[in-house]
Amino acid sequence: MARGHYQLASKDLEEAISRFDPVMTKKNRSTLITRVFRLVRCYLALLDGPRARSALSKLGAQFSSDEPDSSEHKTLCSRVKFLIATEESIKHSRLTDRNWQMAFQSIQLMEREIIGWGPKFNLALLPGLWTCWKVESLAHLGKTVEAEEVLDQCSKSADFTMQYVLFITQTRFQLL
């Protein structure tokens, strides 16, 4: 995870958690919590709120404030909620209201927030659809130079190119 291989690490952790012994001794619970927290941090680094929420749910609702990791749990929960709320706000602004300024402001808020989360984010090339939404918002706001600058920084990433093509294709079908 230290080198930024969050996608691979998340797959490994998912597999390890799925094979976890369901007998909950104190040691087993501690190991499960450690693995789940690592998985959530991977998904947060990938800016994937829904998967991070799903990972947290593996601990169940019985996570009590008496447990040693309760402050870490609260921190992760608040980050997951923030990420999901921001994503929903952007989607609503884009698809329902067509309020590009609000969508762009939500992206900027998210960028400012994630800086303190630990992983070193490249704000020019965020994981998932975040960069696509940023380019789209900038273009709709008439900031084509800024949108092109973001695209230029991303053009060297084959992963981004594939995501962007899929994004444009999906966006076109939603408009029809």
Image (spheres, rainbow, N blue to C red):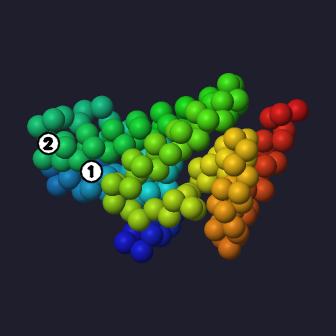
In this view, the residue in front, 107 or 31, is 107
SS class of the residue under badge 2? loop
SS class of the residue under badge 1? helix
Q: Which residue is drawn at 73% across and 52% down?
A: 144
Q: Which amino acid does label 2 sit on?
A: Glu
In this view, the residue in front, 88 or 66, is 88
Q: Where is residue 150 in the image (x, y as percent from the top left)?
A: 64, 60
| Image quarter in which the N terminus is found | bottom left
Q: Residue at x 53, y 44 (%)?
A: 107
User: What residue does disc 2 label?
Assistant: 67
Q: In this view, does 57 lie above or below 43?
A: above
Q: Do residues under tags 1 and 2 come within 8 Å of each other at their CB atoms?
A: yes
Which quarter of the figure has residue 93? top right
Task: Specify which label sits upstream in the sequence, 1 or 2.
Answer: 1
**Dot 1: within a 10 Å radius of its alpha carbon, few (fewer than 14), some, or many (20 or more) residues?**
some
| Image quarter in which the C terminus is found | top right
In this view, the residue in front, 100 or 9, is 100
User: What residue does disc 1 label?
Assistant: 33
> Left or right of 79: which side holds 70?
left
Q: Position of residue 95 (x, y in %)?
A: 70, 31
Q: Which amino acid does label 1 sit on?
A: Ile
Q: Position of residue 26 (x, y in %)?
A: 15, 49
> Left or right of 176: which side holds 57?
left
> Left or right of 131: which side holds 85?
left
